[in-house]
Every structure is written in C-alpha cells, then in structure tokens.
Amino acid sequence: MQHEEMELNSVIDLGGTIRKITAKKTKAIIDPLRKKFGITRIANIDGLDTLDIPVSIAIRPNARHLCGALGKGLTRELSYVSAVMEAIESYHMETPPLPELTGSYQDLYKNYLLIDPEIFPKGSIARGNIKEISFGWNQATNLVNHQINYIPHVLIKLNSSQLNSNAGLFSVTTNGLAAGNTLNEAILHGLYEVIERDSVSRFLAKKSFERNKTKIQLETIRSPVNKSLLEKFIDKKINIEIWKIPSITDFPAYYCRIYDPMSTSVFGYFYGSGCHMLEDIALSRAITEAAQSRAAFISGSRDDIYPSVFDKQRAQQITFPHSGSQESINGTIAFKNTSSSLYSNSFLKNIEIIVAALKIKGYEHVLVFDHTKPEFNVPVVQVFIPGLQS
C-alpha cells in the first residue's frame, strides 16, 4: 500500500465509498496479513437477517479490546474488506508505539510543542489539575498549520487487557480511527467520521419537533444505489426514516433509523449515520450502517453488546409505537443532491478543503496521529478535532 498519495487525481467510485483502488486489489493486499493481525476468520452475518445488505465480521480471538470488527458495503467484497480494515485499525490502536515524552504539561510545555490537555474530553476519573499530572506524549501533525505537536499517549491506546492508571483521565474512543489504501485516504475518512459523530450529537440534542423538520421524503431519493437500498427495506416491510443532519463543515451528513413494526422478537430501533462531501455517499453510509447495526444485534457476535442493550431493545419494542406504516412516518422535505461543488478527485485536496472549512469555523487543531507500522505498511491514522462532540 502507498504511504503517500502519488497520483492526485486517481480515485475510484466503488458505490457507497471512494477509494484509491478496487476492493479486490485491497483484499489481495490485506489477506496475506490477516494472521499477523490475529484475524482467524471473516464471517458473513447478513444471512441471519432478511435485508440482503452485505455485512461481515472479522474475528480476532486474542484482541486486547473487542474481538469482532464489523464491515458493511454494497457488495460482499466491500463488506469483507471493510471488516478486515476495521480489525486492522483496532490492532493498531491496541498496540501503539511507546510514548516519546513523559512528564506533566507544566514541566514540558516550555521545551516542547504540547497540545493543552484541557482541550480534550475528560474521562470518568479525571482528577485535579490535569496539567500537573505526569503521563506519556506522542507526536501528531496539526493539519491547520502543519506543526508537529505532542498529544497525550493515552488517547492513542485502547487496551482493555491491562490496567492503566491514566486511562480514565480522558475519554478514549475509536472516533477518527481510520485505515486506507494511502495515508491521505485514511486521513480523509478519519475526518469524515469525526465530523459525522459531531453532527449526530448536535442532531440528537435537538427537540423532536426540530429534528422532524429535516426528515427526508423517501420517494424523492432517486440515485440508483440508494433507491436500491431503500427497496430492500420496503420489500421486507421494515420501516426506515432518514434525516439530513447539521454538519459543522456544511458538508452532507445523514442519520437513519430502522425498525420492524411486525417483529415479535426483541427488536427496537437500529441507527446509522454517514458524512461525505458527496451527498449520495453520505446517505448510503447512513443506510448501510443501520443495516449493519441490526445484523450485529441479531448475530450476537459483538462482545460490546451487553445484556442491557437487549433489555433496551425489548423496552423499545414494548413502549414505542411501531405499528405505523412507512407512509405515516415519511418525512417532510425533499432529498436534494447538494454535494459540495468543492469536491475533488484528490484525497489530499479534499482534506485541505475540509480543514479550511474547520478553520473558518474557529477550529485551530485538526490533529492526525499516524499509527502506520512499517512492517505491515497499511496506512492507519487517528484524527482528533478538539471541540467537536462525539
């Protein structure tokens, strides 16, 4: 794989995602590495559902956090690659490099370009003055000014197999963790994810009547890919609702909710979201992610789906009015393809466009930590945008 993007204008629309090379070529590159990442098998789990939207799971029994990594796509090959790449991302965050510096912000900031730890989301055991607590630091690149800054090491490590006294100082998540065929492809998808999670947080904070002002009329969605996806839900009489949601960059973002009004099992709502500079891709990602959530629940193969999640689904089934027809829950606004006119067939150019949009909104730190390991040469990054919600 390419650690640097050599050809600026060479990308491929694979349907639901834009990549540097085909899924078949990516699969040929990553398959020989599966054993090194501890992947023992890849299962197709969509057959347990009725939707016929490809969903795969890559299993790593000895993972240091989650054993199962999910992937979805418009084709079996895309869902397979998506699951394996997600597993590769997780492996890298479970095994980050050692800290390059150790000490408190107060002791180090005069000699090193440290990011103020106060700007990162606090964890469950945040205590005292975080600037006076000693912990590790690693270099990250700020895409706004191209400076190399140091960020807390704990943010780039997710290892549930070890106790870490500093783990609860910050909210540590996989938000912004992304792999790609090139470094810039990975960075771009990390940016999309961080912006998407922020968009969902802002949307869900709104009152119900405000949210419904942006609910989409499904019959106005006309792209072949998304019409085909919608037909799968309609054919199986599974209700689907889609909202256009606010994005800090004003690039397209969508939120999707699905449920089966006829189900007699413990099925409540399942959700998905997507963000992309291209409208149709943002929408398809939201739809396929909702289908992925449903398949994961049915399969019971995710080790972070606890009994409480099943209890919540059961409560939704009992409490929420699921009997409405698809027509009765349809939206009020037409789908409009307002894809950014700034979109380029260059990952690097699109990164620059998004960073410029964030800078205009007042975000001074768009930080990228490069997780890529030379022995594997699969680009993996983690994007942090302090101030955005997750």
Image (cartoon, rainbow, N blue to C red):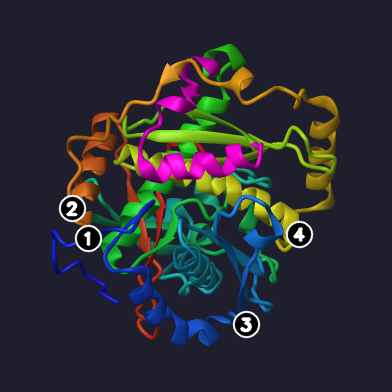
Tell me, yes or no, whether the two marked residues, 1 and 2, touch with CB atoms within 8 Å.
yes
Q: Hey, what amino acid is under mark 3?
A: Thr
Any mark on residue 300, and which?
4
Q: Residues within 10 Å of mark 4 (few under 14, many from 20)?
A: few
**Mark 4 touching mark 2, by CB under 8 A?**
no
Which amino acid type corresponds to the residue marked 1 in the rendered image? Val
Q: Secondary structure at mark 4?
A: loop
Disc 1 from disc 2: Cα separation: 6 Å
Q: CA distance from mark 3 to mark 1?
A: 31 Å
The residue located at (67%, 79%) in the rendering is 62
Residue 118 visible: no
**SS category of the residue bearing label 3:** loop
Q: Position of residue 344 (x, y in %)?
A: 17, 47
Q: Circle 1 sits in a helix, a strand or a loop, which is it? A: loop
Residue 264 image point, x, y percent? 85, 40
**Mark 3 or mark 4: whose residue is earlier in sequence:** 3
What is the quadrant of residue 253 in the picture? top left
Q: Residue at x 83, y 26 (%)?
A: 319
- CA distance separating discs 1 and 4: 36 Å
- Label 1 vs 4, first from the N-terminus: 1
Callout 2 amino acid: Asn
Residue, disc 3:
40
Q: Which residue is mark 1?
A: 11
Q: Is the magenta region chiefly helix, strand or loop?
A: helix
Which disc number belongs to residue 345? 2
Residue furthest front in the image:
235
Residue type beneath disc 4: Gly
Q: Position of residue 66 (x, y in %)?
A: 66, 65
The answer to whether 89 is drawn above or below residue 129 in the figure is below
